[in-house]
Amino acid sequence: MTAKECRGNPERMIRRFIKKTKKERIIEEVKDRQRYKKPSVAKKEKRRRAARMRLKEEQKRQRRKQRRDRKN
């Protein structure tokens, strides 16, 4: 992340930084490591997160397909 990428705009730089850290789950990982989680709880959360991501990706695919169909 450089000032040149954000055209010297500090607000834009902060927004981009926050987006990148959320996408890479940096903040969540730090919070997770602060306290111990039972392995079973960690697995449940991981499964839940994966299912949510699959659902999100499927919805994206459907929206893309609908847009493509409307154009034709």
Image: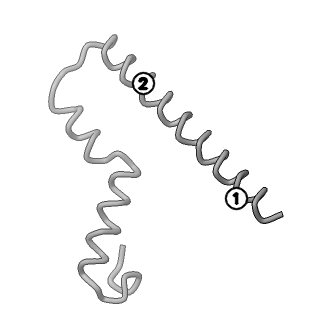
The secondary structure type at the circle numbered 1 is: helix
Which of the image's four quarters has the C terminus?
Answer: bottom right
Residue 47: x and y, percent? Answer: 45, 22
> Would you identify the image quadrant in which residue 67 lies?
bottom right
- Left or right: 46 with respect to 9? right
Q: Name the mark nearer the viewer: 1 or 2.
A: 1
- Name which residue lies at 41% across and 25% down: 46
Callout 1, which amino acid? Arg
Q: Badge 1, how many Cα within 10 Å: few under 14, some, many 20+?
A: few
**Picture residue at 30% right of the left edge, 68% below the top:** 15
Location of mark 1 (residue) = 67
17 or 66, nearer to the observer: 66
Q: Amino acid at mark 2?
A: Arg
**Cβ atoms at labels 1 and 2 below 8 Å apart:** no
**Percent position of residue 55, x then y:** 54, 34
Check the image and report above or below for 13 versus 39.
below
Judged from this view, the residue extending furthest toward the left is 35
User: Is disc 2 placed on a helix, strand or loop?
Assistant: helix
* Closer-to-camera residue (44/4): 44
Residue 13: x and y in percent read 30, 75
**Relative to 13, 58 lies left or right:** right
Please rate how many residues cluster around mark 2, counting C-alpha atoms within 10 Å: few if below 14, some from 14 to 19, many from 20.
few
| Left or right side of 53 for 3 | left
Placement of the N terminus among the 4 image quadrants: bottom left
Kindly identify the residue that appears in the image at 64 percent across and 51 percent down: 63
From mark 1 to mark 2, how far is it between C-alphas?
29 Å
Quadrant position of residue 40: top left
Residue 48 marker: 2
Q: Residue furthest front?
A: 70
Task: State the colouring used for the structure image.
Answer: one colour
Nearer-the-camera pick, 57 or 67:
67
